Amino acid sequence: MDLLRQRYDVIIVGTGVAGLNCALNLPRDKRVLVICKSKITDCDSYLAQGGICRLRDDGDYDSYYEDTMRAGHYENNPAAVESMIKGSQEVIGDLVNLGVEFAREEDGSFAYTKEGGHSVPRICYHEDSTGKEITTTLLAAVKRLENVVFAEKVTMLDIIEDDNCCYGIVALDNASGEVYDVLADYTVLATGGLGGAFGNTTNFGILKGDALAICINRGVAVDRINYIQVHPTSLYCKKRGRRFLISESVRGEGAYLLDKNFNRFTDELKPRDVVKDAVFAQMKKDGTKFVWLDMRHIPAEEIVAHFPAIVQRCREEGYDVFTECIPVVPAIHYFMGGIRSDLKGRTTMTRLYAVGETCCNGVHGKNRLASNSLLESLLFAKRAAEDIACGYSRADAEGEARAVGKLDAAKYSQPKKLLAKYKNQVRKAVRAAAEGKDINVNYKEN
């Protein structure tokens, strides 16, 4: 692949909203390569249903801050939470300027919805496909840039480093099987979550945490890697493969969770981990593989307007949400831990950044508040791009040469085995962290 034979100013690994927004905010005179394992749209950002949080006004700050901290069990990085909330209006403004269409009230103001853990409605949305609306709009904007090129079906096998400085990546062309050393002044990891390493997940199967394993092997700090959020409501299905998410907005708009006897058993608007635990407990008590989600009492016109994709998918699976309950079960959904990064996306390795779900800046704590993910990814990806631009410098040629010289071609001769090794390493690392073997990080203001 000719694109992988060239040198770049910046390499971005991942085409979700974090990778795209980083590319969009880099200087136009910098040559940027964006790669992804599969198709550009095979990213979890594209699947996001519920929406994206926005600080409604100054009077909403304390409530929003407390909701985020409480959902995260107060293990959040306060500086990151403050930065995210205060930057939320900027993010929504940027998206609107790009052409993202959010639901509006009759007077033209934003229509807000509410999800679990929120004390008031503050979530902007586009039907039940907010992620798709944002991702496709960002993608169209980035594709218009002459300085950015995309390489689909390319897998990062390693980072190229020497003396704790990153000089690019080792990349596999999935189609040809060829492996390339792709050099750059800066590398940004925006590789998403790790649900694909475990199964029973709402994530795309290709998201297995490769970047996490690579960073562990290269001595880049990672944090809280056992903090994995399980979403309370995915559509129950006996078939293998990715689970279809039933957005938390459905419960935000009034849907009930019912046991096998069709009785409510929990407060549906508690934070996700609380609701998930209640669902598992009820399944155990009832001896069932799922619980029921009841939307029947919600006005039909509201369901059609707000949740068209969910209605359609349920219909495809044989369920009519207007006349019957649908079976739901918890599924691995979001990664709160990850590659340690500061509020500008900088990792512990020079010239290496991490943004979006693959990083951990502490904003989510132990449990993510609903609809903070798109916001966090967009904001800190933009901050990373701005930081790269502000302090831009060319990589040291001698260091680059040493880094390339250290590479062992034999290590990458069997990519499938290497990737399988990464997957197993991630699973073992998560288990080890859950057993208390991870590093307890005291976040500092960045």
Image: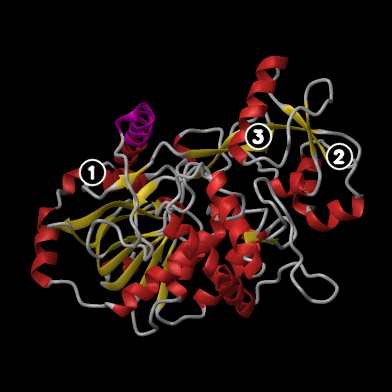
Q: Estimate the spatial distance between the alpha carbons at disc 3 and disc 2, rounded to whole Å.
A: 24 Å
Residue 275 is tagged as: 3
- Crowd band around label 1 with a 10 angstrom C-alpha radius: few (<14), some (14–19), many (20+): some
In the image, taking residue 406 as reference, residue 372 lies left or right, namely: right
Q: CA distance from mark 3 to mark 1?
A: 36 Å
The residue depicted at 32 percent of the width and 71 percent of the height is: 10
Q: Amino acid at mark 3?
A: Val
Query: Which residue is painted at 66% across and 42% down in the image?
Result: 244
Q: Name the mark nearer the viewer: 2 or 1.
A: 1
Q: Position of residue 72 (x, y in %)?
A: 52, 45
First of labels 3, 1 by sequence position: 1
Q: Nearer the viewer, residue 355 or 207?
A: 355
Q: How is the image coloured?
A: secondary structure
Looking at the picture, does residue 189 appear above or below residue 395? above
Quadrant containing the N terminus is bottom left
Q: Which residues are magenta?
A: 424-437
Label 2 residue SS: loop
Give the secondary structure at mark 1. helix
x, y (%) of residue 423?
Answer: 37, 37
Secondary structure of the residue carrying numbered label 3:
helix
Q: Residues within 10 Å of mark 3 (few under 14, many from 20)?
A: many
Magenta segment, principal secondary structure?
helix
| 206 relative position to 131: left or right | left
- Residue 399 lies, in percent from the top left, at 11, 65
The residue wearing badge 1 is: 217
Q: Quadrant of residue 112?
A: bottom right
- 429 is within the stretch colored magenta: yes
Q: Residues within 10 Å of mark 2 (few under 14, many from 20)?
A: some
Closer to the camera in the image, 440 or 61: 61
Inspect this view and state whether residue 16 appears: no
Q: Which residue corresponds to the image point at 51% horizontal and 65% vertical from the top-left?
A: 378
Check residue 320 in the rendering and tell me which mark sits there, or answer none: 2
